[in-house]
């Protein structure tokens, strides 16, 4: 009887242990560690960053843009030269695609996810000290596909030089043109998610961009105060 009791006790101990320490495949994979940390697609568009300066058609906006970029860069931690490029793209799209209502903060979110703003390797003139090429052939600091670059490339300086995907200004304006190509208002949730997911090739990409965009937009809110 004593032996029988011992066998039963050991069996119960093993059963309880297995029940508590079950393999991850039975429980953890159904609810991954990052579940709930990514935003739900199409639920909302991210907040917009503090607006870039007004684009004056017949006057230079360089001083205003430089001052704005310096302040926003200090608040967000984005390299100032990259902020300038994102802000310039927003300013231009107000005229080139006014219905799109693209915010610089979305471009900043893409730049963060794609290359961490080229790793801070942007020269004062906007050129990259080291070219950025992704493993899938995407080029430049915003990882634009060759097909999209060919279809929407644009020279930001309008100096008749060839557009350069390794120039932060050209990359930002071209990315803006890609995002606005369908003519949708990107302040709308579904339009924003569709445009960003198509740009990056996946919903996961858009989710990561959303988080970065939200962070930058909120951090920039103190600008001008």
Image (spheres, rainbow, N blue to C red):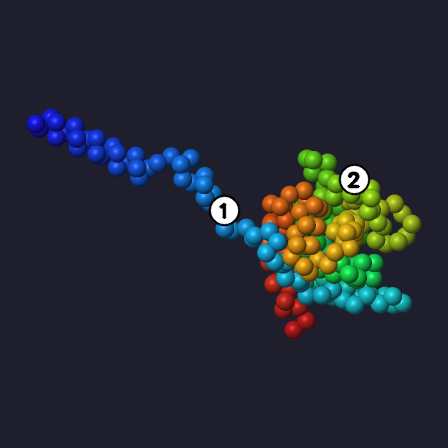
> Which residue in the protein does label 2 denote?
147
Image point 66% across, 62% down: which residue?
Answer: 48
- Identify the residue at the far bottom of this view: 225
Lower position in the chain sequence, tag 2 or tag 1? 1
In percent of width and height, residue 149 lies at 79, 43
Q: CA distance from mark 2 to mark 1?
A: 33 Å
Q: Which is more toward the observer, 99 or 59?
A: 99
Q: Which is more toward the observer, 18 or 106?
A: 18
Give the crowd class for mark 1: few <14, some 14-19, many >=20 residues within 10 Å. few
Quarter of the image holding residue 45? bottom right
Residue 87, relative to residue 25: is it above or below?
below
> Which residue in the protein does label 1 denote?
34
Quarter of the image holding residue 187? bottom right
- Left or right of 16, for residue 222: right
Residue 46 appears in view: yes
**Secondary structure category for the residue under label 1:** loop
Residue 77 appears in view: no
In percent of width and height, residue 177 lies at 79, 52
Give the crowd class for mark 2: few <14, some 14-19, many >=20 residues within 10 Å. few
**Secondary structure category for the residue under label 2:** helix
In percent of width and height, residue 139 lies at 74, 41
């Amino acid at each position: 009887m004593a032996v029988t009791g011992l066998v039963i006790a050991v069996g119960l101990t093993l059963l309880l242990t297995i029940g508590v320490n079950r393999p991850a495949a039975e429980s953890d994979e159904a609810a991954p560690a990052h579940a709930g940390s990514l935003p739900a697609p199409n639920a909302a568009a991210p907040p917009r960053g503090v607006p870039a300066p007004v684009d004056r058609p017949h006057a230079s906006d360089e001083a205003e843009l430089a001052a704005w970029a310096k302040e926003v860069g200090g608040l967000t931690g984005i390299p100032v030269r990259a902020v300038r490029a994102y802000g310039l793209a927003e300013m231009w799209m107000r005229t080139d695609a006014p219905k799109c209502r693209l915010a610089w903060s979305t471009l900043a979110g893409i730049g963060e996810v794609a290359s961490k703003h080229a790793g801070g390797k942007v020269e004062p003139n906007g050129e990259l000290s080291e070219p950025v090429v992704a493993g899938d052939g995407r080029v430049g600091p915003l990882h634009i596909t060759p097909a999209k670059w060919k279809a929407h490339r644009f020279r930001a300086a309008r100096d008749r030089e060839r557009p350069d995907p390794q120039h932060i200004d050209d990359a930002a304006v071209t990315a803006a043109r890609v995002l606005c190509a369908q003519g949708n208002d990107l302040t709308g949730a579904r339009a924003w998610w569709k445009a960003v997911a198509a740009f990056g090739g996946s919903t996961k990409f858009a989710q990561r961009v959303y988080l970065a965009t939200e962070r930058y937009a909120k951090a920039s809110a103190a600008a001008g105060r």
